[in-house]
Amino acid sequence: MHEILIWIYLTNSVLLINHEIDSAYWKEWELFKLPGGITGFLLMHFPLLFLILIGQILVVKGSLAGLFFSMGLSLGGIFAFSIHTYFIKKGRDEFNAPVSLFILSALLVVSILQMIMTIYLLKQ
């Protein structure tokens, strides 16, 4: 099961990182009224990407901390899907391209799968 989580975490990381690339295209800082424009947005992503990647290392090592990072990543994917779905339903045009919708939908599915797998491993 641990081997499966490694690949699920990697898949979800790739989806979330691609979503963040898509977020730069859609100027997500304007959507969320974040200060600093593209500069602030990019600076914010240094620690975010670091945490995603350190989490992958900890999951590979099979540490308890890796499971907590895994839970955090899955929650992040579910949050990304939820908040952008909310904005789309409010009539916003951002993230309405087919590839954006695919990434968000895949994030939801993979994040739920990852959460289930993580909870299972936490209970062992």
Image (spheres, rainbow, N blue to C red):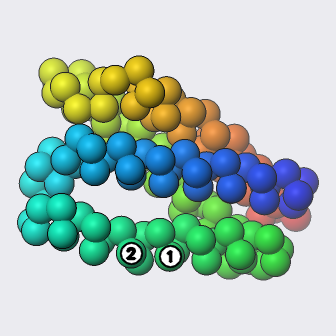
**Can residue 119 be spotted in the picture?**
no
Mark 1: amino acid: Phe
Which residue is rendered at x = 25% and y = 26% of the image?
88
Q: Position of residue 83 (x, y in %)?
A: 31, 40
Please state the horizontal and vertical placement of residue 102, each as a whole percent of the image. 49, 27
Q: Which of the 4 image quarters holds residue 113?
A: top right
Give the quadrant of the C terminus.
bottom right
Helix or strand or loop: what does disc 2 sit on?
Answer: helix
Residue drawn at the location 23% of the way across and 32% of the way down:
94
- Percent of width and height locating residue 32: 16, 51
Task: Please tell me which residue lies in front, 27 or 80.
Answer: 27
Residue matched to label 1: 50
Q: In front: 89, or 7?
A: 7
Mark 1 and mark 2 in contact (Cβ < 8 Å)?
Answer: yes
State the SS at label 1.
helix
Mark 2 packing: few (<14 Cα in 10 Å), some, or many (20+)? few
Q: Which residue has dot 2 on it?
A: 46
- On the rendered structure, is 27 left or right of 124? left
**15 sits to left or right of 46:** right
Q: Is residue 85 above or below residue 33?
A: above
User: Eyeballing the image, is 4 above or below 61?
Assistant: above
The answer to whether 44 is drawn above or below residue 99 in the figure is: below
Q: Amino acid at mark 2?
A: Phe
Q: Residue at x 80, y 71 (%)?
A: 60
